[in-house]
Image (spheres, rainbow, N blue to C red):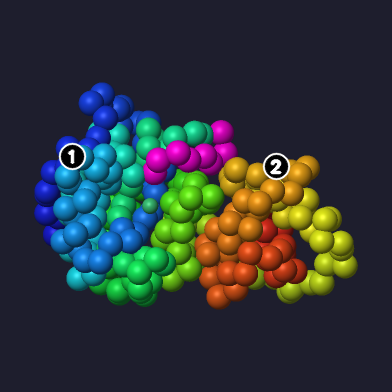
Amino acid sequence: MKLKVKKSLNYSKKSRDLKNIKYIIIHYTGMQSARESLKRLIDKKNKVSCHYFIDRKGEVLNLVDDNKIAWHAGKSKWKREKNLNDESIGIELQNKGHFKNYEKFTNLQIKSLIKVIKRLMKKYNIKKYNVLGHSDIAPLRKLDPGENFPWKLLSSKGLSIWFSKKKERNYELKDSQKRVIFFKNIFKIGYRYFNLSNRNKGDVRIIKAFQMRFLPKEVSGKITDKTLHISQLLAK
Ligand SMILES: [Zn+2]
């Protein structure tokens, strides 16, 4: 695999032990072009970066060494972890993003991404359930990589989780009951930033984050029976 190196200075001074790397976080850049994205990820005044950047032709650039903590995730939570930068490798994919002109990721981009993830998983013994999107760990703030990202394809290669298809069912439950079951399920999966006992205005964003990942054609922010069902299958 071609791997160009272009260094960013946006990382923490202190190096980390490589055995602390447990997660891979996938992002899109949300910038107009690869050139603009790289400029942003390298410029010291922006205080953002990632370890790997993949442009739309599938070219991979290494911006920060794996043993450095790059600044890609920001405030984030997953299971018991907070601030996932410390324990993760961040991969940015060039895509204009939801606020500009959200594109499909290119085949070349995904092909390269798969190679990078495979290599990292092997090198650091990263589990497939720890390959996550930015919106999974920061659902109130982030939409990337979004519903165009091929999570199902990744899972077919053993690089992320998916659910086994089971016959759908109708849940004859009140909305409030559905809410409790759904959020209990996704808490088990790892999602945070909600309160099991109280509705919150952030709930819709969290439901959407879950749907962008597992039900990308139906990102409604509503706990439909299908949404609930998939959360049940995943929580098992
Ligand atoms: Zn991101």
Q: Residue 6 bears which disc, if any? A: none
Q: Is residue 156 magenta?
A: no
Is residue 58 rendered to the left or right of residue 188?
Answer: left
Q: From this view, report whether residue 126 is shown above or below residue 32.
A: above
The residue lying toward the viewer, choosing from 191 and 67, is 191
Residue at the spot 82% in from the left edge and 61% down from the top edge: 175
Residue at the spot 82% in from the left edge and 56% down from the top edge: 176
Label 1 Cα crowd, 10 Å radius (few <14 / some 14-19 / many 20+): some
Q: Is residue 76 magenta?
A: yes
> Which amino acid type is shown beneath numbered disc 1?
Lys
The residue lying toward the viewer, choosing from 224 and 80, is 224
Q: Residue 195 bears which disc, if any? A: 2
Label 2 Cα crowd, 10 Å radius (few <14 / some 14-19 / many 20+): some
Q: Which residues are magenta?
A: 73-80
Q: Position of residue 132 (x, y in %)?
A: 46, 51
The mark closer to the camera, 1 or 2, is 1
Q: Say which residue label 1 marks.
A: 44
Residue at the spot 37% in from the left edge and 37% down from the top edge: 85
Looking at the image, tell me whether mark 1 or mark 2 is earlier in sequence order. 1
Q: Position of residue 89 (x, y in %)?
A: 33, 44
**Image quadrant in which you'd find residue 163:** bottom right
Residue at the spot 29% in from the left edge and 34% down from the top edge: 69
Secondary element type, mark 1: helix
Q: Magenta stretch: dominant SS?
A: loop
Secondary element type, mark 2: loop
Pointer 1 and pointer 2: residues touching (CB < 8 Å)? no
Is residue 50 rendered to the left or right of residue 137?
Answer: left
